[in-house]
Image (spheres, rainbow, N blue to C red):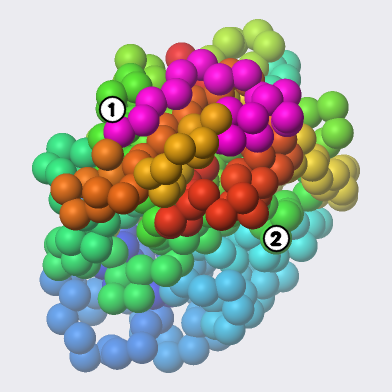
Amino acid sequence: MAEALRVGIAGLGTVGASVARVLRDKAPELTRQCGREVVVSAVSARDPKRDRGVDLGAAKWFDDPVAMAQTAEIDVFVELIGGDEGPSHSSVKAALEAGRHVVTANKALLAKHGVALAETAEKKGVLLNYEAAVAGGIPVIKTMREAMAGNSVTRVFGILNGTCNYILTRMEAEGLSFDACLKDAQRLGYAEADPTFDIEGHDTAHKLSILTSLAFGTRIAANNIYMEGISNISQADIRAAGDLGYRIKLLGVAQRTESGIEQRVHPTMVPTASVIAQVHGVTNAVAIETDILGELLLSGPGAGGNATASAVVGDIADIAKSRPGFQHGPVFGLPAKELRPYKKAQMRSHAGGYFIRLTVHDRIGVFAAIAKRMADNDISLESIVQHAAGPDTALQKTVILVTHETTEAAVRRAVDGITRDDHLTDKPQVIRIERAE
């Protein structure tokens, strides 16, 4: 049997402790599957005295993760610190430069430094594995990087943030407000005390940028993503979507267009009969559309200690199964130096159907003026519904419009015109309708 694979874990929070526990509890199974033992030989964290529910007495303690990354006492450096700078970046860079394999769950780090780190890994002939960085326990990275040879991806989209999906699910199922659902998500540990990173779409954008690179062979461009969060989604939107046969989801979408690659994160209406509309709670899902395979949907737990630890351990096991002299595949599907510059498509040219909710003054001529603004911008309407805005708003009406396929630019021009006409009593709501099988 080959020598044991020595693992160093940097970061012993929920995920790090879960990884150490799985490696201990599943040691016999991993040895049989990998053909060698996998042992935790070193650890690094802020507090050496904290009880993490797993015995780490046999592992050497390092106060400095960079020192652990460089030591000859480990073969694999597992980064679970978090953050795109500071010790996470410096330690991963040091490990790769020292010829150590790296496993990370850090999407922010990869979104900012992934291509440079991939170049170092490929130059040193070591692996940089990151399955846990996108969609938790769902094996989407391995699927796209290893199982889809010959396929050309046309679109990849999905529910990539469990916090947002949990909030939208509760809003629909129980008729609760956004604020009430967010508070409950925080109480249950699904949302941070400061939830901005999740609810405004940043977390989804980081994950989407990694999927975009894998799908289209481009350099990661996390700063070139159109982004809207879910904080402005109301019960009026949830109810109207249901009446129209749709469900609202926060999606990350990347697709190839004639003008470039389009990356966007925003609330989206998907048909209630579609598979992705059935993904509820903290579950994640990723759909991949290709020329050969057609559409593939992967769904499962997207966060949490066990789900993320499962993905991390899977990456470690892949390294344990490799042998000296084995030629490792590129980190992002193509050699890092061959990744093409990202060419951003014009978001305003995005074509599709749109849901538009307008709260307007209840007076003669408003309905006709709205219809005229739509016609002036060549927007064809699939449906238009008018009803009272609510029991306490007798002087207002809510107008719900669903368009046939049109462009983002046309919709924005029409809504801007309606706003200038002084017909609105509240901020307009525009939600894209996404094609989803």
Q: Front-most of 353 and 260? A: 353
Residue 223 is tagged as: 2
Residue 213 as seen in the image, left or right of residue 163: right
> Closer to the camera: disc 2 or disc 1?
1
Assess whether residue 374 is covered by the magenta stretch: yes
Q: Front-most of 423 and 166? A: 423
Q: Position of residue 372 (x, y in %)?
A: 64, 30
Mark 2 surroundings: few (<14), some (14-19) or many (≥20) residues within 10 A: few
| Residue appearing at x 70%, y 60% in the figure | 223
| Residue appearing at x 66%, y 46% in the figure | 417
Q: Position of residue 178 (x, y in %)?
A: 26, 56
Q: Front-most of 17 and 274? A: 274
Mark 1 surroundings: few (<14), some (14-19) or many (≥20) residues within 10 A: some
Q: Position of residue 268 (x, y in %)?
A: 47, 36
In magenta, the rendered stretch is 369-387
Residue 166 is tagged as: none
| Residue appearing at x 63%, y 59% in the figure | 111
In the picture shown, does residue 185 fall above or below 64?
Answer: above
Give the residue type that dot 2 points to: Asn
Which of disc 1 and disc 2 is earlier in sequence? 2
SS type, badge 2 = loop
Q: Position of residue 21 (x, y in %)?
A: 22, 60
Can you identify the residue that label 1 sits on?
242
Q: Residue furthest front?
A: 364
Residue 102 as seen in the image, left or right of residue 300: right
Give the residue type that dot 1 points to: Gly
